[in-house]
Amino acid sequence: MTISRGELLIDLEALRHNLDVLTAQVAPSQVMVVVKNDAYGHGLVDVTKAAVESGICWIGALDVPTSLSLREAGISSPTRIFAWLLDPAEDLEPAISASIDLGISTVEQLNTIAASSAATPARVHLKIDTGLHRNGATPEDWPELVARARALEDQGTLEIVAVWTHIAEADDHEDSLSIARFEEAVAVAHDLGVPSPLRHLAASAAGFARSDARFDLVRFGAFVYGLPPGDGPSAESMGLRQVMTLSAPVSVVETLPDGRRRASIDLGFADGLSTLAPGRIGVAVHGRRHPLIDPLEVDRAWFDLADDNEVAVGDLVTVWGDGSAGEPTLQEWGDATGTMSEELVVRLSPRIPRRVI
Amino acid sequence: MIDLEIVRSNARILIADASPNRIVVDLRGDAYGHGAAAVAASLGAEAVDAFLVSHDEAAHAIRASGVSIPAIQSFQADLADASLIGPEIFGLDTASVPDPRGLGLLPAMTLSARVLSTKKVGADEGVSYGYVYRTQTATRLAMVCLGYSDGIDRHACNGARAWFAGSTHPVAGRVAMDVFMLDVGDDPVSPGDEVVLFGDEAKGYPSPVAWAASVGKSAAEVTASLGDRIVRSYV
């Protein structure tokens, strides 16, 4: 089949395989599948539906608009949808009425819930800051947050579903300190009348590796898509499969005045490819790897053909994939360009057509 | 926010400087993130002979906005006898115009975002993933609603500064997928406040050129890779 400028192939079979691996790895803890940023560029609704069909009960959607769009797409209760990036000016009534679980860090946010006109109690996850210092109540502010939430729970305004945090994954020792601070916060909440909340702390890396980080629920984003951290074990060695393949047809083949031969694809830095890529990584054509070369243009990337005479206009170039056609994985791309595979996938232009298999 | 009056003013400076050839304005990469259709419409009455665009969609959008100047793609374009005006039209640095402000070319884009929440922290506290940033003194941190999914470089913590309340402050820690932290020091800060990543230096903002240099990129690459979650508004 012909593809225009480029194509993202999303392999839901690989995704389902990853979910099975992750579910087995952390059992009896549950798995939350994080689908923020259009499911890391893989397609919000397709990924969420595949996860729900695989038996996943928790979806992490980042914000209220994304959460509501999932409810509208038919992801209904009892599938829980979690939103934790809340706009301070946002009316939370639609989220509460749609039974969206809300990540709450401040008394002001609790007051916003109390002031909403929702007819049903809001489901809240109270967040403690255990060192990352983004959102989450500081340990000093934590008792006040819990006490205020308890008071509103008694009034029927909300239900305290969970206590949670987010850790820095700086190193094992720092993460252990965060785990200890989290357990302390759970104990404080217990003493303030929250007897047995759901507890969640870990995202992909810590959740996969450390049983003491899993608690009741692990929030898996990157690993769902087969994206391991940089400079570490490969997806394959962890039993995971990369879900996304990016490919594009050869648009030009030419010989430069100095005799070097090069070819292009019509994807450039405006499509999300990094200008750091030339000289550091290559692409695959007919199973052979060819290095990207400067310049990476706004809408075009060039690669060196050396003595490969078999590359012609229209041939399929695999930019990244699971490696089975000789192409680099996203982990290799991240390592080569000084970033993480997550940054590469979420920065891809949404205008690149996506095909789900 | 994109100021189309600045685009027009920059265009007039560049067209006056160009040799009296065919003038082609480079609007590839959706006008380097500025919006090809809106920019083309704003230049509809200028002495421009053609727009260079990346794809059919951009060409269609330009025609649909009522612009009669042709939009052409690279493979259709014979630029041998043309003067090609590039990202410098947006006040961005290019190989041919390394110092746009020196020519009177002002940045057309102001990138701003709102503070979602704030936090007081003590001295020597690690911030964000990997704790690569540590606070020097007790300070206030503002969580700003932009992240690397929006095209903000993960490594902006290595020297990038953003404007808040009259002065610039360091990006604190690795930029996360959807937010970054700004170390605003003693300045009072509240949810909903505005932070400016880059814009017109005359207003005290970091210039797009300075912001891009602090992440090791060209300004055109920075603006072209900004995500769609960032609302483009025009004045």
Image (tube, coloured by chain):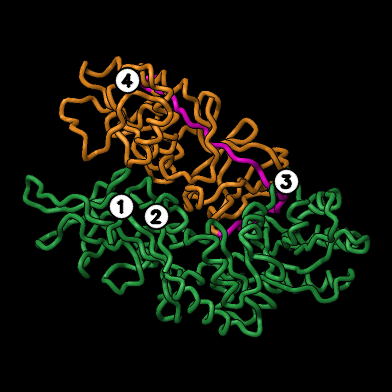
Work out how far the residue at label 3 is from the one at label 2, CA to CA, in angstroms. 32 Å
Residue at image mark 1: A4
Give the letter of the chain under mark 4.
B
Badge 2 element: loop
User: Which mark is in front, 3 or 1?
Assistant: 1
Residue with the mark numbered 3: A90
Decide which of tag 3 and tag 2 comes sooner along the chain.
3
Q: Residue at x 43, y 65 (%)?
A: A356
Q: Nearer the viewer, residue A41 or B62?
A: B62
Q: Colour of chain B?
A: orange
User: In front of the other: label 3 or label 2?
Assistant: 2
Asked which secondary structure carries label 4, the reply is helix
Residue A38 location in percent, x, y? 53, 57
Q: CA distance from mark 4 to mark 3?
A: 44 Å
Q: Viewed as shown, does residue A288 lie left or right of B124?
A: left
Are the residues under badges 4 and 1 in a single subunit?
Answer: no
Question: What residue is pinned by disc 2?
Answer: A353
Are dots 2 and 4 on a single chain? no
Instruction: Confirm or deny contact between disc 1 and disc 2 (CB under 8 A).
Output: yes
Depicted A152 relative to depicted B212: above or below: below
Q: Residues within 10 Å of mark 4 (few under 14, many from 20)?
A: many
Q: Magenta stretch?
A: B102-131
**Disc 1 to disc 2, C-alpha distance:** 9 Å
Q: Amino acid at mark 4?
A: Leu
Based on the picture, tell me whether residue B123 belongs to the magenta stretch: yes
Chain hosting mark 3: A
Which quarter shows the C terminus of chain A? Answer: bottom left
